Image: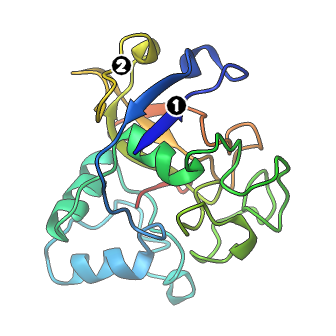
């Protein structure tokens, strides 16, 4: 179906608002958890994150996996028969077709709907925010972790985007991140906010689904 992508009230890189068509796709309901990623590490299919403080702590088993760069995220997705979502697929899954500012219906955000802006000061177990689910039943599309997407970042990509199944710039220096995190504010938790980081960046507020 279609998606009105972007926001005229957002940053310059969210403009212009444009209509894109997307083929049907599957996307994980939650972010990939520490336990899920650890299982692949333990079988030798995935590399261990350089920082194992979350991976080695049983208390974080159902929290999202962190300290993983873009290549590690993409490799895990391919090993389980998937891939990282495109930026357009991510936005469609987060906001649906009615132009939501946040994944839920109303235009307000608080700590009952998302883990953002220091609500907890750390990651939360995936699926903790029932009041914050997206139109398609996805959890943590706002807050908890910034999520890697498949696309290269181009500040002006919306000015030249393909109108069917866009896949982002052909090349670049950075990959697109979406969704905000426990470390960022309400502005970044908007469904249209576009962020970027180095492919090899390792942080405890970046993950994937």
Residue underneath mark 2: 161
Q: Relative to 80, does residue 159 appear above or below in the rendering?
A: above
- Provide residue 45's location: percent of width, then percent of height: 14, 73
Lateral position of residue 109 relative to residue 51, left or right? right
Which picture quadrant has residue 22? top left
Is residue 202 something one can see in this rendering? Answer: no
52 or 13, nearer to the observer: 13
Which percent across, then down, holds residue 88?
A: 41, 38
Direction from residue 20 to residue 117 in the image, left or right: right
- Please state which of residues 98 and 205 is positioned toward the viewer in this rendering: 98
Determine the residue positioned at 36% across, 11% down.
160
Which of the two residues, 69 or 108, is positioned nearer the viewer here? 108
| Label 2 Cα neighbours within 10 Å, binned few <14 / some 14-19 / many ≥20 | some
Give the position of the C terminus as an image quadrant. Answer: bottom left
Question: If you read the primary sequence from the N terminus, does the residue marked by circle 1 or circle 2 appear first?
Answer: 1
Location of residue 184 with respect to 142 vertically, above or below: above
Q: Secondary structure at mark 1?
A: strand
The residue located at (53%, 64%) in the rendering is 136
Estimate the x, y position of residue 142 in percent, counting from the top left.
64, 54
Outermost residue, front direction?
1
Query: Is residue 23 toward the left or the right of residue 203 in the image?
Result: left
Query: Do the numbered discs 1 and 2 sit on residues whose CB atoms are within 8 Å?
Result: yes
Quarter location, residue 59: bottom right
Is residue 119 placed above or below 57 in the rendered structure?
A: above
Residue at figure coordinates x 78%, y 50% from the top left? 117
Q: Residues within 10 Å of mark 1 (few under 14, many from 20)?
A: many
Which residue was labeled with disc 1? 5
Whether residue 101 is visible here, answered yes or no, is yes
């Amino acid at each position: 179906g279609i998606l009105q992508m972007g926001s005229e009230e957002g940053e310059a890189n969210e403009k212009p608002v444009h209509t894109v068509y997307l083929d049907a796709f599957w996307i994980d309901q939650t972010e990939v958890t520490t336990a899920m990623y650890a299982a692949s590490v333990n079988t030798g299919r995935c590399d261990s994150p350089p920082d194992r403080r979350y991976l080695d702590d049983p208390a974080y088993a159902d929290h999202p996996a962190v300290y993983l760069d873009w290549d590690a995220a993409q490799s895990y997705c391919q090993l389980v028969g998937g891939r990282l979502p495109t930026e357009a697929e991510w936005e469609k899954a987060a906001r649906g077709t009615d132009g939501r500012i946040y994944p839920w219906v109303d235009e307000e955000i608080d700590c009952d709907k998302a883990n953002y802006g220091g609500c907890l000061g750390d990651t939360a177990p995936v699926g903790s925010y029932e009041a914050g689910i997206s139109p398609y039943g996805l959890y943590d599309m706002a807050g908890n972790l910034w999520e890697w997407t498949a696309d290269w970042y181009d500040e002006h990509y919306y000015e030249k985007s393909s109108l069917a199944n866009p896949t982002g710039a052909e090349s670049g220096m950075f990959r697109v991140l979406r969704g905000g995190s426990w470390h960022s504010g309400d502005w970044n938790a908007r469904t249209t906010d576009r962020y970027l980081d180095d492919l090899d960046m390792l942080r405890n507020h970046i993950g994937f689904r």
